[in-house]
Image (spheres, rainbow, N blue to C red):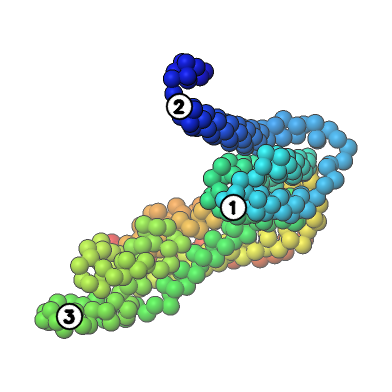
Amino acid sequence: QADPLLQAGSLPAYHENNILIQFYTLSSFISVLECHLRSHLTMQSLVSDTAKRLEELPSTVGSMSQTLQCVAEPVATDPVQLAECLRTEAAKVGLVCGCAASPSEAELQALLLSLQRVVTALCLSLHALTRDAGPSFRQDLDHMVQACAARNAELVRSILRPADVPRAVANVWDTCSAVKAPLTNKSALFKRMGGCLKAVNDTLREMAEIEQQPMESIQEEDSTSDADEDEDVESSHQRRPDHATNGHTPLGTNGLLHDSRGPNAAQPDEGSQGLEEDGSSSVCDFEAGPFSAKDRDVAAAGQALMGVAANTLKLLSRHLLLGSDSLVGAPVEAWENCVWHAKNLQSSVEDLGAAMYPPQELDEIEDMTEGLVVSVQCILEEVLQEHMEAAAEAASSLQSELEVAEQRMRAAVLSSRNETH
């Protein structure tokens, strides 16, 4: 409303005009502000609704899986092609929303609608494959759907924070890269079998490194380090780095790190080496002693036993790779049983490898040996000979090698125990 003083004409005309100008300027500013607020609220609401729908997509698609399984043919759209389309849609969002200038409401709505359609189609296509999927393949498919929905919801929410858009786009691209052919039961099973074989080979590599290190050099290093303690501080400081690399670090420190970080810890970290060179570390006070002759005999017997386990997994993987690409029904269940035994075998090998470092607990080594032998026998007898007759000859050969390796291990443990007592 106009001021009463203005209505009474008590102010000069130019004051009245000035106030009116300021009033209209303020009104225009408020109108623009309302437009911006309305646009911001609309964008925020659109982004929030779309992200929420994407986050709820896995459960929505999961409830539709039974309907999809009743269809005579699965969804025809290729998930790999849809993953590439999703990569393109994510790039569009990154180009439009990753800059300082905000897109218009119509542009944003079109982008989000297109993105949501591709994500939904990809999730539906992946779930359509669960009709004939075994447990391993179904787990992979569910993980892909969950990751696809979560990453794209993150991308949509990042639109309100343009600085986060490039990282969110990269995460979506990583998810798309995980959707790659072939998407079959065979590929899912082979991936798990390959992971078990890799872990067993890593443990075998550690055992080979132990065998390559001569026992005499360790004893000489111990005597040399005792002599260094009687020398002056300056000469000891000069010679200690050489001793750290002449056998003490690979066996002593590596053995300690193996016990604390697991059997795959092949090398000590730089921090441990630096403290050891300075002479101020207390790590050496707790490190295991050097390998004795009996310790090496036990470790060599353990390496032979692990070699049989690795050959068993190689045989298993080879027959899976050479088998039919379309695994459904009973064959899938048989191979799932193989994977379960392979994982048990991997755990047995890793536990036995960790027990090879001194001081060796012979009772534990015997128990771990028994567990490894049982796992190999389960694969050879219950799986290979029953479900894969073509591998029966190779399985029989591995069974003989297993018996020899087991006898060698038990003899080495018995000899080491007799020497200790």
Q: Residue furthest right?
A: 72
Of the pair 398 and 322, the residue shown nearer to us: 322
Residue type at tag 1: Cys
Of labels 3 and 1, earlier in sequence is 1
Alpha-carbon span between mark 3 and mark 2: 98 Å
Of labels 3 and 2, earlier in sequence is 2
Query: On the picture, is 62 further left or further right than 198?
Result: right
Alpha-carbon span between mark 3 and mark 1: 61 Å
For residue 29, above or below residue 221: above
- The percent position of residue 314, horizontal first and vertical second, equals 65, 64
Residue 130 can be seen, yes or no: no
**Residue named by callout 2:** 12
Of the pair 36 and 363, the residue shown nearer to us: 36
Residue 202 can be seen, yes or no: yes
Q: Residues within 10 Å of mark 2 (few under 14, many from 20)?
A: few
Between disc 2 and disc 1, the foreground one is 2
Alpha-carbon span between mark 2 and mark 1: 50 Å
**Residue named by callout 3:** 236
- The percent position of residue 376, horizontal first and vertical second, equals 59, 56
Of the pair 47 and 117, the residue shown nearer to us: 47
Residue drawn 28% across and 61% down?
Answer: 421
Between disc 3 and disc 1, the foreground one is 1
Between disc 3 and disc 2, the foreground one is 2
Residue drawn 28% across and 82% down?
Answer: 242
Q: Quadrant of residue 292?
A: bottom left
User: Which element carries disc 1, helix, strand or loop?
Assistant: loop
For residue 44, above or below residue 163: above
**Residue named by callout 1:** 99
Residue type at tag 3: Ser
Residue type at tag 2: Pro
Of the pair 131 and 125, the residue shown nearer to us: 125
